[in-house]
Image (cartoon, coloured by chain):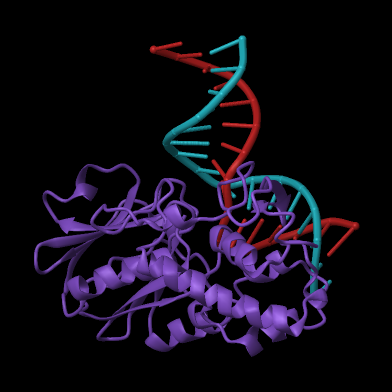
Chain colours: A purple, B cyan, C red
Amino acid sequence: MPELPEVETICAWLEPRLLQRRVERVHIARHDVCTVWEKATSGRVTPRQLLKGGRVVELCRHGKQMALVCDDGRCVCIQLGMTGQMMMGDADTGASVKCRHVHVRWLMNDGTELAFRDPRRFGGITCLVRRSDLDARWAELGPDALTIRVDALKRGAQGSKRMVKALLLNQRVLAGVGNIYCDEALFLAGIHPETRCCELSAEKVTLLARTLRRVLRGAVRAGGSTLKDYQKPDGTPGIFQRSHLVYGRGGEPCTQCSHELVRAVVCQRGTVYCPLCQPV
DNA sequence: CCTGCTGCCTGGACGC
DNA sequence: TGCGTCCAGGCAGCAG
């Protein structure tokens, strides 16, 4: 599932292939995956709202969201949800042509095609009219997790009785962390996922911020984690899944102490941790 | 403010 | 081979 490192990898791959290209045509196979920012559902989204005729001047990311920005300020903000993919290739022979669940295609003026595919449709596309709308949308999220600072994390944790896992997964506190990197960071920081935020020492919060940045940076370097659906826009996988220490390893021995890793449900999410290395 | 629950959605795994 | 069932989980919305 795409979290911050996967989206960052996708953006980095797409940027040189999209910048300065013009969107010649937009094909919308499913209108219901598209919404217009701060507009009540007033009919179907138009190709123009999806950047038709615009020149791409910027690709950016905040947390798990990515956006294409055109020279006239129009933007599309893309959330990949659980199973969303961006595919890019030749408009006639690229992989997306014969794929199911491709909901939107952008045909560029150089004969390439960008496609949004999302079998389970937990993701979606938001159209924005001005570049400043994108800033407004992203201002509702917390700071980007890749560069999270200790004081921002402290503010979220201070005096809060919620569990630290809930804190890390809350995109308004910290943007970009999902279930995988949450569990990985908590393991490496030696923090039990059910620890109440107010019980965390200042040292632990500092360690957690540093660990989050380290885990996410490492995952970006590895091109993200490919479990099932995620792939880079050219179809190649990431390799960070090989580095997972707890995620998907319930029942296996802990890499640090050999004790059996526990799988439990925390915050309604499947959660894996080491009961010895991550004491309550 | 917080937690916990539901619903959205498909594909893969598994049991029979 | 083909059913039925369960599970994965990001996020919005709602009740308590």
Residue A217's place in the image compared with A180, above or below, is below
* Left or right side of A178 for C1: left
Where's residue C15, x and y in %?
84, 56
The picture quadrant where one finds residue A99 is top left
* Left or right side of A83 for A249: right
The picture quadrant where one finds residue A205 is bottom right
Number of marks present in the image shown: 0
Residue placed farthest to the front in the image?
A257
Quarter of the rendering occupied by the C terminus of chain A: bottom right
- Residue at left offset 77%, top offset 74%: A197
Where's residue A113, x and y in %?
18, 60
* Left or right side of B11 for A190: right
Q: Nearer the viewer, residue A252 or A205?
A: A252
- Residue at left offset 50%, top offset 64%: A41
- Residue at left offset 72%, top offset 61%: A278
Where's residue A164, x and y in %?
72, 69
Residue placed farthest to the left in the image?
A110
Q: Nearer the viewer, residue A104 or A270?
A: A270
Whether residue A218 is visible, yes or no, is yes
Where's residue A237, x and y in %?
32, 53
